[in-house]
Image: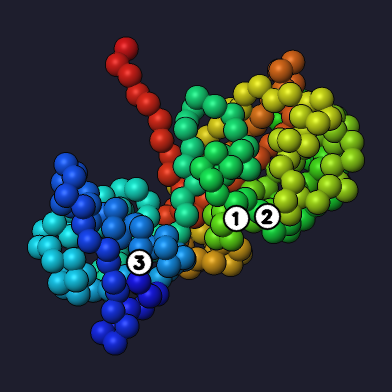
Amino acid sequence: MSADATPDRPVRFPERGSGPSPLWAQTAELIQDEIQRRGLTAGARLPPERELGERLDISRVTLRKALAHLVDQGLVTASHGRGWFVAAPVAPREWPNDLESFTATARRKHMTPSSLVLHQDLRPATLDDADRLDVPAGAPLLRLERVRLLDDVRIAVDRTLLVATLAPGLDAVDFAKASLFEELHARGVELDRSETTIEARGADRTLADHLAIEPGSPVLALDQTIYARDQRPVLLSTVEYSGDRYRLRTTLQPR
């Protein structure tokens, strides 16, 4: 399958199996396997529905059910009037049952995390910072601002303020690859819980440029205060995820 398939470069799909799986499920597996086999990246366009249906010898109803399943899996996306495309990686999170770093989540999902460091320096705590972090105004805080990537796709912008005296030396760490949570753990700082608010908003021009999206595009902002095991506030973090690259999953039970 090419990034923009044309009639003179046909897509060769393997034959469907004769197992118990429904035809639409077999079709979805074939499309997914072909995407992986050809190494198609986010934004690559699939052949038109009519062409796919003819090559796979299936009805449009079956094909659309297969494609809808791949959309649910976060593997493809539809653009009205333009067709079907390989989707950008999505950063899934189990919520609110764990406190897991971006890096750990990525590794668990077999993705490669990385960061573009925008700011990494020490700055004095403002009155508001000091109140939230329970430190004197003017106390040194590490400011760490990063564009977070999964498989080289921009997923989020993470802005963090950390009480510098709790983990000296972090201002010299290369956070293009390093995990902040892992660096804290290595310095004896064990994180326990976070208090988080979640808000949907539109991206301003600066955020849009960092995420390679259009200004006004939807983002999901997580504002967190994270506490150590002794219940001291350790860091403040605002993470703004591109709305089409983040999935929030939780479990609700009746009381």
Q: Is residue 216 above or below residue 157?
A: below
Q: Which amino acid, by three-letter code, is at mark 2? A: Ser
Which disc, if any, is residue 115?
A: 2
* Closer to the camera in the image, 104 or 122: 104
Q: Position of residue 51 (x, y in %)?
A: 19, 74
Count of marks placed on residues: 3
Return the disc, 3 or 1, that comes first in the chain's sequence. 3
Query: Relative to 185, does residue 244 appear above or below in the rendering?
Result: below
Q: Quadrant of the C terminus?
A: top left
Vertical order, 131 against 222 (above or below): above
Above or below, 8 against 227 in this view is below
Instruction: Indicate the quadrant where residue 79 lies.
Output: bottom left
- Mark 3–mark 1 Cα distance, whole angstroms, equals 20 Å
Q: Residues within 10 Å of mark 3 (few under 14, many from 20)?
A: many
CA distance for labels 2 and 1: 6 Å
Location of residue 216 in the rendering, given as x and y in whole percent from the top left corner? 46, 63
Label number found at residue 149? 1
Q: Nearer the viewer, mark 2 or mark 3?
A: 3
- Sequence-wise, which precedes: disc 2 or disc 1? 2
Decide which of tag 2 and tag 3 comes sooner along the chain: 3
Q: Position of residue 235 (x, y in %)?
A: 72, 34
At mark 1, the secondary structure is strand
Q: Which labelled disc corresponds to residue 85?
A: 3
